[in-house]
Image (cartoon, rainbow, N blue to C red):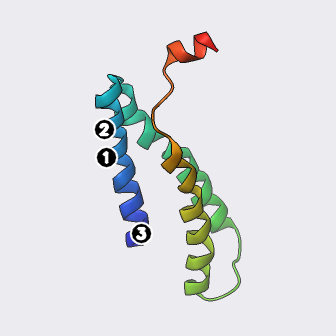
Amino acid sequence: MSGVGCALGALRLRALALAERFGMNLLAGLIPAALSPGSLLGGHCYERRSWPGTLTQQLVAVSAPFALSWLPLTAVTSPRSPTDCDRA
């Protein structure tokens, strides 16, 4: 679980850095807030189903996709601003 805490903590720091760097204060709250609906849905789905295996096996099974889902975020160098969308 410390890996999850580190990932979420790093995301908050990254959001603050991006907000400051690009002058988009909205990013400081919007990026971490975007995780809330996913957490709610994931928790609901996890609770509604009976899972096979031990708790350790279950933790590994859900932690691996979580870790892999962070890989695309390492490639992002800057946020898209609303003016970028108008130019596209």
- Left or right of 14, for residue 49: right
Mark 1 element type: helix
Q: Secondary structure at mark 3?
A: helix
What amino acid does circle 1 point to?
Leu
Q: Are marks 1 and 2 in contact (CB under 8 Å)?
A: yes
Is residue 12 shown left or right of residue 81?
A: left
Residue identifier under label 2: 17
Q: Mark 2 against mark 3, which lies toward the viewer? A: 2
Indicate the secondary structure of the residue bearing disc 2.
helix
- Quick one: label 3 or label 1, which is nearer the N terminus? 3
| Nearer the observer, 12 or 40 | 12
What is the C-alpha distance between the residues marked 1 and 2? 6 Å
Viewer-nearest residue: 55 or 5: 5
Examine the rendered structure and indicate whether residue 56 appears above or below residue 63: below
Residue 59, picture quadrant: bottom right
Q: Residue at x 61, y 79 (%)?
A: 58
Residue for badge 3? 3
- Amino acid residing under circle 2: Ala
